[in-house]
Amino acid sequence: MITTAKRSLVKQQKILETAAKLFLENGYEGVSVDEVTRAAGGSKTNVYTYFGGKEGLFIAVVEYLIADALQPFKALKVSDHPPEQALKELGRTFLDVILGEHLLALHRLIVAESARFPQLGRAWFAAGPEYVYRSVEAYLEAQQRVGRLRPGNPRRAAALFLDMMTFDVHHRTLLGVTPRPGQAELERLIEDAVETFLHGYMP
Amino acid sequence: MITTAKRSLVKQQKILETAAKLFLENGYEGVSVDEVTRAAGGSKTNVYTYFGGKEGLFIAVVEYLIADALQPFKALKVSDHPPEQALKELGRTFLDVILGEHLLALHRLIVAESARFPQLGRAWFAAGPEYVYRSVEAYLEAQQRVGRLRPGNPRRAAALFLDMMTFDVHHRTLLGVTPRPGQAELERLIEDAVETFLHGYMP
DNA sequence: GTCTATAGAAGGATAGAC
DNA sequence: GTCTATCCTTCTATAGAC
């Protein structure tokens, strides 16, 4: 037997996932509530009772996408290996995640709507970049304590390292200037970043 | 005497500037042709005869904004000073430009619409980041030739330097996560980036 | 009998195109 | 300035679960 409560939850989830796909493809203004209900089944009334309207639906969708899309970061463990190896491992995982089509589309959506919905920009930053910065910071600090890296502000060092590895390639791919680079090119980029960083931070 | 051709040019310019302001504030879908003509004066027909429609107007507006907004970069001369001084000077100018409210809004607009209008992403990248990378690359290469920096791919080095100085603060400010940092904080950031970079690239 | 989901139409406003 | 299309939202009415 299917209870009402259960059906309602399933329906909410269905709406959320359908709307997510549409918003990622067409942006906030590019999607109508009619489209969402047509694709998800059910009635428009659902959107209004569950989410309060289109804006509420959009916020729920993006928060859901953020939580979901950033799972790989949470799973990302910076190993105890020595700096060169650990940073390269980290670089591979990190670039692979943020250059994924799904995350690029989400990033585009959030940047586009961050003026209209400031809370989304903050939620994204806290769950994504900030979280990763902190993981790397913790690793660098530990390495500093053991004397394998020279002392200095570890938060800043983490940001410098990740940023120099990331910005150019992310920016290009996000804007469709060049296609996503192959593994070989990414590897060269990672090596250059690690080398430059370690030259600056070795004791 | 005011010729017809002249009046038409003036009107086109007026529409362009009015639409620019509105698009920057509200995004592509957030602006109606009615609004533009109401603010610019004249009739909606102008938009269709001069620009072919809303999409044509938008493309013309963004291309105009790109050409205009990037004047500071063209004027940006990397001096012949030794690396530490030259890079710091460059850092100050560069951060000051890209953290300006006008450029942040343009960047938001382009990222938002780069999926719908791919040519805008490419035009922006070529006129902006690519141009700056190349200026810094030329400077670094010259310094390498004189032996003040160690040899290596100067394009990659330029990107690493600019990116590590830029990404975090630009990202935060773009999304409204934190307000634009004051001069003192920027100065610390620049110093850290220059120091880290030079540790890696000094001979 | 009461509550909730569904289906779809109606209202009121605004869009882009010509 | 007109025209047609579409948008978000609300409302009515029916069916099913508790």
Image: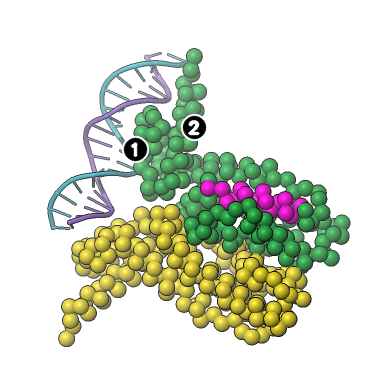
Chain colours: A green, B yellow, C purple, D cyan
Q: Is residue B31 left or right of residue A192?
A: left
Q: Chain of mark 1?
A: A
Residue B203 spot, x, y in % from top left: 77, 76
Q: How many marks?
A: 2
User: Residue shown at 58%/55% (left/top)?
Assistant: A181
* Callouts 2 and 1 in the same chain: yes
The residue under label 1 is A34
Circle nearer the N terminus (2, 1): 2
**Chief secondary structure of the magenta portion:** helix
Q: Chain of mark 2?
A: A
In the rendered image, is residue A194 in sight? Answer: yes
Crowdedness of circle 1 by 10 Å Cα count: few (<14), some, many (20+)?
A: few
Are discs 2 and 1 less than 8 Å apart at CB? no
The residue under label 2 is A13
First to last magenta residue range:
A86-101
Q: Is residue B102 left or right of residue B82?
A: left
> Which of C4 and A96 lies nearest the eye of the viewer?
A96
In the rendered image, is residue B92 in sight? Answer: no
User: Residue shown at 51%/81% (left/top)?
Assistant: B75
Q: Secondary structure at mark 2?
A: helix
